[in-house]
Amino acid sequence: MTEEQSASKEPAVIRVKPEWCKGCRICVVFCPRDVLEMENGKVIVVRPDDCIKCNLCELRCPDFAITVE
Ligand code: SF4
Ligand code: SF4
């Protein structure tokens, strides 16, 4: 019996700490799937289903304000 657990099929959990986000837009620019947008100077997750979990947003954020699981 084989158990197929395709991790890539699980939806990404993108967490933003608004109090740490300074609104630099780096994550928005680097995201290849337009998952993120700015709202009132903070980043928000608008299309989580499109996230490919590339982690670029997390790696590029200078303030550790965004994480992807
Ligand atoms: S992990 Fe990649 S695709 Fe997902 S929000 Fe971050 S930059 Fe965009
Ligand atoms: S890169 Fe970090 S600080 Fe800059 S907008 Fe994105 S979450 Fe906010």
Image (cartoon, helix red, strand yellow):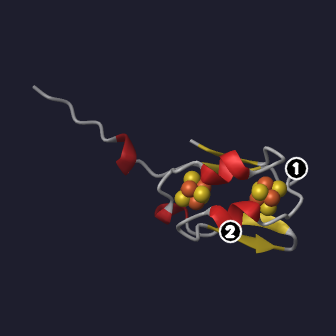
Residue 27, horizontal then vertical, whole percent? 70, 60
Residue 3, horizontal then vertical, whole percent? 20, 30
Q: Going by the image, does 48 lie left or right of 60?
A: left
Report which residue position mark 1 lands on: 20
Q: Quadrant of the N terminus?
A: top left
Q: Count all numbered tags in the image, as a single digit.
A: 2
Q: Going by the image, does 46 lie left or right of 26?
A: left
Q: What is the CA distance from the residue labelled 2 to the residue labelled 1? A: 18 Å
Quadrant housing residue 29: bottom right
Residue found 52% across the figure and 51% down from its top? 54
Residue found 61% across the figure and 52% down from its top? 56
Residue 69, horizontal then vertical, whole percent? 56, 41
Report which residue position mark 2 lands on: 29
Q: Is mark 1 within 8 Å of ligand 2?
A: yes
Q: Nearer the viewer, residue 33 or 50?
A: 33
Residue found 64% across the figure and 63% down from its top? 30
Three-letter amino acid code at the position of disc 2: Val
